[in-house]
Image (tube, rainbow, N blue to C red):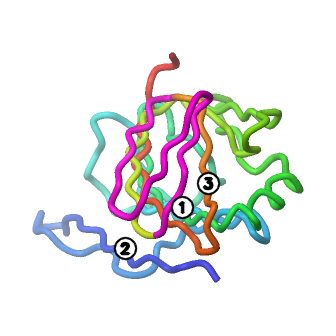
Amino acid sequence: MARLFRRVVTGHNAAGKSIFLLDGPAPSVVRRGTGATVATDLWETRSTPAGNAGDEDPTIGHPYRLPPPRNGTIFRIVEYPPDAQRVAAMRANTGEHERDATGGGYSRDVAHSRHPGFHKTNSIDYAIVLSGEIHALMDDGEVLLKTGDILIQRGTNHAWSNRTSAPACIAFVLIDAEPL
């Protein structure tokens, strides 16, 4: 069962006063199949600088995509099940991550010998481990991240490996970046 995350979003009323626009479970939740990751998109921006006008929810009304929109951002929480479940699900579904509708920003290294989840996006990602622990893998090396640890992922080829028997939960802020 995917964890529901309460999301509170502020905005402005017609008189320009600050108000709470949304308060409830984030509606954009994607499960990639049995035993796979669950991604909850909390917010998205589609330009820089971001606009604060309007009251539309930018996380709904479009298909899931891994990278942020061009010149935009995504705030997302991902729950990684143990690799014992997740790796089998990834091998069964080689299209686990879809390309952005614009065709940009993502490549997947399905032939990588260390882990089938290796991928690369044209983004800078701030990753904060909310619960559990997970190994961040690079082409050369790996590091164990535990609750409270933060990783700054700068457009590198990488994978996530949960070698425990419990899920790991990570909050990500993905920011569009120029390709390396």
Residue shown at the point (59%, 74%) measured from the top left: 166
Residue shown at the point (72%, 35%) measured from the top left: 108
Q: Given contact means CB atoms under 8 Å apart, are the residues at marks 3 and 1 in contact?
A: no
Residue shown at the point (42%, 34%) measured from the top left: 124
Disc 1 marks which amino acid? Val
Front-most of residues 73 and 56: 73
Q: Answer with mark 2 or mark 1, whichever residue precedes in sequence.
A: 2
Residue 168, percent across and down?
53, 66
Disc ID at residue 7: 2
Residue 3, percent across and down?
53, 79
Instruction: Report the number of numbered marks.
Output: 3
Please, what secondary structure does the residue beneath circle 3 have?
loop
Residue 11 located left or right of residue 122: left
Q: Answer with mark 3 or mark 2, whichever residue precedes in sequence.
A: 2
- Which residue is at the far top? 180
Disc ID at residue 78: 1
For the magenta stretch, what is the residue range? 132-155
